[in-house]
Image: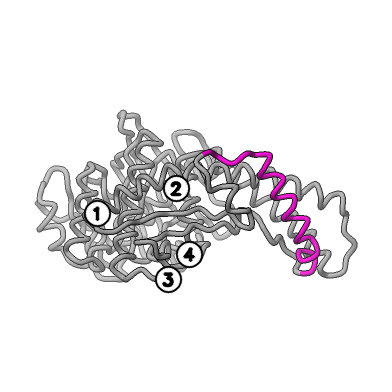
């Protein structure tokens, strides 16, 4: 995938920015707070319908405006043209248009322009909460599989309905037991579907991750990732063969029977894939508990390298690569591993406060470009 042009309108501190991009590496250089990360956010908005920076969508709208937008013109590896535009408004629903049609949903565009982002803030993947690791897993699977996205939307809808009933019961209101049982069965069915997809992904993705980590660490350390579905017996998912759907249904029914009273007391669903965990280990120790700062950085680069290769294989399309201020956080050895990832040929977007990054590593005037960003204004450096 290659983006030819990128347009920002009233996004963060940009009024109206339009640039033509180089096919390989595009470096955005500027002081912090001047709008260079916003360039990457605009790409993310067009790829995922949201930014890779954790924030409410409406936070992207420039102060004093009531809407912002980002749009790209691009072409696939097979040279098929692709356009997409995403508008966020303070008063209306998000408006998404692309070559696929108008008034689309996020589900329609996610995965069409695969994207991998790397930022120092992503250290939470290995060191943060289970929710951080689920978000990492769900993001990859959603870009790789529209069916998985559909399942996750169904899970969200079912949990909303079920939790509304449980909250009502907590507040002493009578509850329609038959209807609650129906929602519980729906939750079980979608949970089985999600667990099976996550189990299969874990088996595939862990191989990519181990290879990437071995390359970065020169094979000196052993790394693994384990899938721990919430409340399910470990023996159900620990074998070499996928778990039986019927065994999963039986297990979930037992689980929800056992937590029924607790759920009514607390007013919320107590189990399910919305609570699943991924465990990363380094040399047998749980990464979030025992890994050094350097091991966390190595693991993050390995995970993102694996994500890039996995999406490339699954989508048969080269993902875009977004690197947000990563070189200021890495020593020369780990920075070299990131540069190795750039050798994949992906179109790459880099933010930095130091223009030497460009001059020392991206000197091909035809394929690469340097942009200076100041107060929301973007200027391409002269060759």
Q: Nearer the viewer, mark 1 or mark 4?
A: 1
Residue of label 1: 219
Residue drawn at x 20%, y 60% is 335
Residue of label 4: 55
Callout 1: SS: loop
On the image, the x and y values in percent for residue 137 come to 47, 52
Residue of label 2: 140
User: Where are the magenta residues, as a range?
Assistant: 241-265
Callout 2: SS: helix
Residue of label 3: 289
Q: CA distance from mark 1 to mark 2?
A: 25 Å
Residue 205 versus residue 166 in the image, above or below:
above
Q: CA distance from mark 4 to mark 2?
A: 19 Å
Residue 253 inside the magenta-drawn segment: yes
Q: CA distance from mark 3 to mark 2?
A: 24 Å
The quadrant where residue 3 appears: top left
């Amino acid at each position: 995938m290659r983006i030819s042009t990128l347009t920002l309108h009233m996004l963060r501190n940009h009024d109206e920015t339009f640039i033509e991009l180089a096919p390989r590496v595009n470096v955005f250089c500027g002081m912090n707070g001047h709008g260079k990360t916003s360039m990457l956010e605009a790409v993310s908005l067009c790829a995922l319908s949201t930014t890779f920076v954790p924030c409410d969508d409406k936070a992207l709208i420039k102060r004093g405006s009531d809407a912002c937008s980002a749009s790209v013109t691009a072409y696939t590896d097979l040279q098929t043209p692709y356009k997409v535009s995403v508008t966020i408004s303070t008063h209306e629903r998000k408006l998404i248009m692309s070559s696929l049609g108008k008034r689309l949903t996020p589900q329609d565009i996610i995965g069409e322009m695969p994207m991998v982002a790397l930022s120092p803030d992503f250290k939470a993947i290995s060191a943060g909460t289970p929710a951080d690791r689920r978000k990492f897993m769900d993001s990859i699977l959603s870009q790789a599989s529209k069916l998985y996205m559909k399942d996750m939307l169904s899970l969200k809808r079912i949990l909303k309905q079920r939790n509304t009933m449980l909250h009502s019961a907590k507040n002493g209101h009578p509850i329609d037991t038959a209807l609650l049982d129906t929602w519980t069965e729906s939750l079980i069915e979608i949970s089985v579907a999600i667990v099976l997809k996550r189990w299969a992904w874990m088996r595939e993705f862990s191989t990519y991750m181990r290879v990437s980590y071995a390359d970065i660490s020169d094979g000196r350390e052993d790394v693994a990732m384990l899938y721990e579905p919430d409340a399910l017996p470990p023996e159900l998912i620990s074998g070499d063969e996928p778990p039986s759907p019927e065994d999963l249904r039986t297990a979930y029914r037992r689980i929800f029977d056992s937590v029924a009273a607790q759920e009514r007391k607390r007013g919320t669903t107590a189990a399910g894939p919305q609570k699943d965990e991924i465990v990363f280990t380094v040399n047998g120790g749980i990464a979030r508990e025992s890994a050094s700062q350097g091991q966390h950085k190595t693991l993050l680069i390995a995970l993102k390298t694996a994500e890039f290769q996995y999406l490339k294989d699954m989508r048969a399309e080269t993902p875009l690569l977004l690197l947000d201020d990563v070189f200021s956080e890495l020593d020369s050895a780990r920075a070299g591993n990131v540069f190795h990832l750039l050798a994949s040929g992906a179109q790459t977007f880099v933010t930095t406060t130091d223009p030497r990054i460009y001059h020392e590593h991206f000197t091909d005037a035809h394929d690469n470009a340097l942009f200076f960003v100041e107060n929301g204004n973007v200027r391409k450096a002269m060759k």
